[in-house]
């Protein structure tokens, strides 16, 4: 909401500068979004346009002869479409200096000299209207400084939290400022000077058939209204508030809404059938044309304002087409009602139709005072500024006055919650200044009733907040000490996640943080069998589901970096994947680690010109190191599942003690291609949910060997389908003396023959009790050779 | 005794040791070094022959001399490898040695700035005795709104644009506050807990907002927790995070789940409160929302709201990252350009 400081001064005597007003607003919880000074610089004068001629060299420009009160008329080049001879408009004369530093000087425009600039409202900072020159009223004095008509003002824009609907008006803001400054709020309501003649009750009847939804309905009738532009001051206040002036009747209803916070509707009295107003709920679904010429689909229960025949307005939201004010309107029926917030919000949300009116009603307006002030003041303004005659009497249907419950406030509880003691008398003063009704209710109790315009006060804590925000939170001392609870152990999840991150980051991988929203297409590509979590109201098809795999995000990052000429990429991402859990309300969320490598793991360098390309074994080694670093134990690798959606044959499954599981390997090229990645990509995706929260296994110390080990190397030639791990396990199982089996060379070649490969192992043999003799070593060697031959048909390569 | 072994004696050992010492001293070229190696350490070298000769000693002599022979061999081998001639050679070539060539390109990784900030916040609060809890990102409407005192059909619900999974029932959490509810339901006071996590907002992606971001939520519930404790805790946090001279300023605000509710501004660390473009000339940065836990929320979680009071706070990690690093577009945090990531 935006308003001028001068308008606020209608309600409160303010002598401090605008900056201090803003500080006061902030201190009570009204956020100031902007403060702008409206200032018409000296030199902008009221000028009369004497003649308008075509510009010789430009179709859209005019050459005007202008009287600005100087001895001779001035020549001014002007492009405004509404420029006309006889019109009064503001002229920025030569030497005028605008606040932004722009100074008017003599200028040649397409070959014609111009001695100043005729201005639009926007150019003067009066509004955003740049459609043409500001047309000044005929009584403006030619040659006078325009600033005399438009004195300096400050425009304050505020942002309100949804609980403070009561501040959506000048009156509401003024109440807060006045309470803070300790001054009264002035009554700005006008009493209409009623004409003689028939009373309003004889000219229109109002009945409320839905009192729960519409507790109060007030109205007034003003006859003989002449539709015309509003007076300049009124139009300017609306412009300052960002509301476009339209005509006196519409402007007055808008003005009253901003002034008192009470939305109004003006009906053309002539269009009200049978001169009857009935407030009722729609019984059945029905179409309804609102005054913005849009057909709306109403449902049973929507609150309607009806005349004797049909609905004429969607209560509290928008009037209907056919009963609104037109240029032909003479008699105006003004509606000021109190509609209950939830009903208005329900209809407004369903129709997707939010108006200044519905915005206020759904936050709650004042059913007690402002509703009456508004309708009376509006009627009087129609008399003053639209030549109307106010019909005597006010319609006011208010069957059951809105009551506010009493809330008990204990000063001891104020101290308990705020940590500072506020004397009872101060509490009463504060609450009374905010128009709460307070009664002493014993030693440690004040009985409080919130004013009718406050819709955010329900419990004692709400009253304590009122006390706190006026006491000033900055005045509450900061505690120096706080008790520490010693009952909680340090978080295993955090220390394990840290360990994973540190291991991978130190190994040269960069952590990425990626979007967990993805497209249906990508989810289907990466995990066709998974049941994804689908967003009902996505921002775009790209973000219509939660991801079922981390791969999509990782490949997107990879493509992004490869496209930016970064060929060597190593990432990890710790995030969540989401799948619908059958029979559960909430999906299954897993903590997942994704590791991605592409290009070189070790970059090319002058003494290693090939670099080290990332490959299957690079990522495998990374995971082994990771698991050792984080104390997860050894990883087990198994054959890849058949027809994996994104891994090709060069892949395997990974698991660790039932707590980590996943798969790793080379990605299928067509999957990479779907993400515009052409290079080979190695990837691992591990579910670490259980690992993160598992209790760490105790570390026990294994005594270091006291005796030397014998090391023997073997090179076997055998079928290429025999896995290295099978050989290692076989060798290790042959004797308890075998301590370690490490492959150190693998060879395939024509010399060996088809289907064969040679694989060399280094075997370490050691006894923990004594130094082994050569003979014992030879015995183990012999066992190994014969077992390899028997089990795998392996021959020793010479 | 065989041809390539020599039975060691004490005298022979002493003499050999002397010989070797002066031999090592006099080496001054690769050729001389090779001659020395063959003479003493080679397969048929003197020391190798002595080692092989040990097996021909009597058991008593073996015990006596065997270890000495082996020790001498190993010591000579070691000294040969570290002999002064190698060092002399290096210094002789120092003129041509180019130390300016790059070192080995060990890969350098890193931890994402958002994680770094999250962990810094976490470490400060765990240092103050807060523990850590988590919650699901896909939540029920009740945990995200209802239990947190968002009244049904109230405009407060419009404060957070929500992604729904099942209309009015299941949604992507819009804040980490539902984790508070879970903590309060599952544990008994006293509670001191922070809840970091990812949250979602159905807002058009722009330089200022992303469809998801990360928050750290904090909660402290005990018998005598006051607003002064909230202030003290947040001031201590701000000083640790932004620097010892940091001040905080508190403005009234509104959240359905706290009463009173406040916004906490932190003294602008860039200009020290003087006013700059980062703080839009105000000298203050809006960092977090906080308040005293609403009695209805305590009651919804089965906590006696007469006996217990509490405070809660929440801050956005992205917002702090943008301010701290002077980043003007939130999307860059999720693009993961390695040239960006390497800067942290
Ligand atoms: Zn600053």
Image (cartoon, coloured by chain):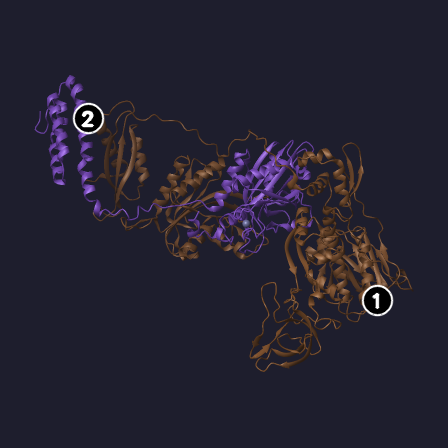
Q: Which chain does brown denote in the image?
A: A
Q: Secondary structure at mark 1?
A: loop
Q: Quadrant of residue A328?
A: bottom right
For the N terminus of chain A, the quadrant is bottom right
Q: Position of residue A540 (x, y in %)?
A: 55, 57
Chain B representation colour? purple
Which residue does the numbered mark 1 point to in the structure image? A388
Q: Is residue A673 visible?
A: yes
Q: Mark 2, chain letter? A: B
Q: Nearer the viewer, residue A460 or A721?
A: A460
Q: Mark 1–mark 2 contact, CB under 8 Å?
A: no
| Residue at the top extreme of this rendering | B60
Neighbours of disc 2 within 10 Å: few (<14), some (14-19), many (20+): few
| Residue at the front extreme of this rendering | A71
Q: Are dots 1 and 2 on a single chain?
A: no
Q: Position of residue B213 (x, y in %)?
A: 54, 48
Q: Which numbered disc covers residue A312?
A: none
For marks 1 and 2, give the CA distance.
122 Å
Q: Position of residue A749 (x, y in %)?
A: 23, 48
């Amino acid at each position: 909401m935006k308003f001028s400081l001068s308008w606020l001064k209608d309600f409160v005597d303010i002598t401090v500068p605008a900056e201090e007003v803003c500080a006061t607003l902030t201190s009570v919880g009204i956020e100031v979004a902007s403060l702008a000074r409206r200032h018409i610089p000296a030199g902008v004068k009221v000028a009369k346009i004497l003649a308008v001629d075509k510009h010789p060299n430009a179709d859209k420009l005019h050459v005007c002869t202008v009287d600005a009160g100087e001895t001779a008329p001035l020549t001014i080049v002007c492009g405004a479409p509404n420029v006309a001879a006889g019109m009064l408009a503001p002229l920025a004369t030569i030497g005028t200096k605008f606040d932004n530093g722009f100074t008017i000087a003599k200028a040649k425009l397409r070959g014609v000299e111009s001695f100043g600039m005729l201005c639009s409202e926007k150019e003067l900072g009066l509004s955003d209207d740049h459609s043409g020159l500001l047309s000044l009223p005929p009584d403006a004095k030619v040659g006078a400084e325009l600033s005399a008509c438009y004195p300096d003002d400050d425009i304050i824009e505020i942002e309100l939290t949804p609980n403070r609907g009561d501040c959506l008006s000048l009156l509401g803001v003024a109440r807060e400022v006045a309470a803070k400054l300790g001054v009264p709020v002035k009554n700005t309501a006008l009493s209409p000077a009623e004409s003689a003649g028939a009373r309003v009750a004889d000219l229109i009847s109002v009945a409320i058939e839905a009192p729960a939804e519409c507790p109060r309905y007030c109205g007034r009738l003003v006859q003989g209204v002449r539709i015309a532009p509003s007076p300049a001051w009124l139009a300017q206040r609306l412009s300052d508030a960002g509301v476009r002036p339209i005509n006196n009747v519409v402007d007055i209803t808008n003005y009253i809404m901003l002034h008192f916070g009470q939305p109004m509707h003006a009906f053309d009295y002539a269009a009200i059938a049978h001169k009857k107003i009935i407030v009722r709920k729609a019984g059945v679904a029905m179409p309804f044309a609102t005054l913005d010429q849009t057909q709306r689909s109403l449902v049973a229960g929507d609150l309607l304002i009806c005349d004797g025949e049909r609905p004429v307005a969607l209560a509290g939201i928008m009037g209907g087409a056919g009963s609104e004010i037109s240029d032909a309107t003479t008699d105006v029926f003004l509606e000021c009602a109190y509609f209950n917030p939830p009903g208005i919000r329900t209809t407004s949300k369903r129709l997707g139709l939010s108006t200044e009116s519905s915005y206020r009603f759904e936050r709650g307006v004042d059913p007690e005072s402002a509703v009456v002030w508004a309708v009376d003041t509006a009627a009087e303004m129609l008399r003053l500024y639209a030549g109307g005659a106010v019909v005597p009497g006010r319609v006011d249907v208010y069957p059951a006055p809105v009551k506010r419950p009493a809330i008990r406030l204990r000063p001891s509880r104020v101290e308990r919650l705020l940590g500072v003691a506020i004397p009872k008398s101060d509490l009463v003063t504060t609450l009374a200044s905010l128009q709460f009704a307070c009664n002493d209710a014993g030693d440690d109790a004040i009985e409080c009733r919130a004013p009718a315009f406050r819709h955010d006060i329900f419990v004692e804590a709400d009253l304590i907040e009122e006390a706190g925000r006026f006491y000033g939170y900055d005045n509450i001392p900061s505690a120096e000490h706080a008790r520490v609870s010693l009952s909680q152990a340090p978080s295993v999840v955090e220390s394990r996640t840290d360990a994973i991150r540190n291991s991978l980051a130190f190994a040269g991988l960069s952590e990425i943080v990626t979007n967990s929203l993805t497209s249906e297409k990508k989810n289907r590509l990466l995990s066709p069998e998974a049941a994804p979590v689908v967003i009902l109201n996505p921002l775009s098809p790209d973000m219509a589901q939660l991801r079922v795999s981390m791969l999509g995000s990782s490949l997107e990052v990879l493509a992004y970096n490869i496209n930016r000429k970064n060929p060597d990429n190593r990432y990890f991402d710790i995030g969540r994947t989401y799948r619908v859990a059958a029979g559960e309300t909430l999906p299954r969320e897993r903590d997942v680690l994704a590791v991605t490598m592409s290009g070189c793991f070790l970059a090319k360098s002058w003494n290693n010109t090939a670099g080290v390309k990332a490959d299957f074994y690079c990522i495998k080694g990374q995971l082994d190191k990771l698991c050792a670093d984080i104390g997860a134990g050894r990883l087990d690798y198994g054959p890849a599942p058949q027809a994996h959606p994104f891994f090709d044959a060069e892949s395997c499954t990974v698991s660790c003690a039932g707590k980590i599981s996943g798969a790793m390997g080379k990605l299928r090229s067509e999957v990479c291609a779907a993400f515009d990645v052409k290079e080979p990509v190695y990837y691992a995706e591990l579910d670490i949910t259980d690992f993160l929260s598992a209790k760490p296994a105790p570390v026990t110390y294994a005594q270091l060997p006291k005796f030397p080990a014998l090391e023997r190397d073997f090179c076997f030639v055998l079928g290429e389908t025999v896995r290295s791990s099978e050989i290692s396990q076989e060798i290790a199982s042959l004797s308890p003396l075998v301590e370690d089996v490490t492959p150190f060379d693998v060879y395939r070649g024509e010399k060996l023959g088809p289907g064969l490969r040679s694989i060399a192992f280094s075997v370490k043999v050691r006894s923990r009790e004594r130094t082994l003799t050569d003979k014992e070593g030879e015995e183990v060697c012999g066992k190994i050779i014969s077992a390899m031959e028997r089990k795998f048909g392996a021959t020793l390569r010479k | 005794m065989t041809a390539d072994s020599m039975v060691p004696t004490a005298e022979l050992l002493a003499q050999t040791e002397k010989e070797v010492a002066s031999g090592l001293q006099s080496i001054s070229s690769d050729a001389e070094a090779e001659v020395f190696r063959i003479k003493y350490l080679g397969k048929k070298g003197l020391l190798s022959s002595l080692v092989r000769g040990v097996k021909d000693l009597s058991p008593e002599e073996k015990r006596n001399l065997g270890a000495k022979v082996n020790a001498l061999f190993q010591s000579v081998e070691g000294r040969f490898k570290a002999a002064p001639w190698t060092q002399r050679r290096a210094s002789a070539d120092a003129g041509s040695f180019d130390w300016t060539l790059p070192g080995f390109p060990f890969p350098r990784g890193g931890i994402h700035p958002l994680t770094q900030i999250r962990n810094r916040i976490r470490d400060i609060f765990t240092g103050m005795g807060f523990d850590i809890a988590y919650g699901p990102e896909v939540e029920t409407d009740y945990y995200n709104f209802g239990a947190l005192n968002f009244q049904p059909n109230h405009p407060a619900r419009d404060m957070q644009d929500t992604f729904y999974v099942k209309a009015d029932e299941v949604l992507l959490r819009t804040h980490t506050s539902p984790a508070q509810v879970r903590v309060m339901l599952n544990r008994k006071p006293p509670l001191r807990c922070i809840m970091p996590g990812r949250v979602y907002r159905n807002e058009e992606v722009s330089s200022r907002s992303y469809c998801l971001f990360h928050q750290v939520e904090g909660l402290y519930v005990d018998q005598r927790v006051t607003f002064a404790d909230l202030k003290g805790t947040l001031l201590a946090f701000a000083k640790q995070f932004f620097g010892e001279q940091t001040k905080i300023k508190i403005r009234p605000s509104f959240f359905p789940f706290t009463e009173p509710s406040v916004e906490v501004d932190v003294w602008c660390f860039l200009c020290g409160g003087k006013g700059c473009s980062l703080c839009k000339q105000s000298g203050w940065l809006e960092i977090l929302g906080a308040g005293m836990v609403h009695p209805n929320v305590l009651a919804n979680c089965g906590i006696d709201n007469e006996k217990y009071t509490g405070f809660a706070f929440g801050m956005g990690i992205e917002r702090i990252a943008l301010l701290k690093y002077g980043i003007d577009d939130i999307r860059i945090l999720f693009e993961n350009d390695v040239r960006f990531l390497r800067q942290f």
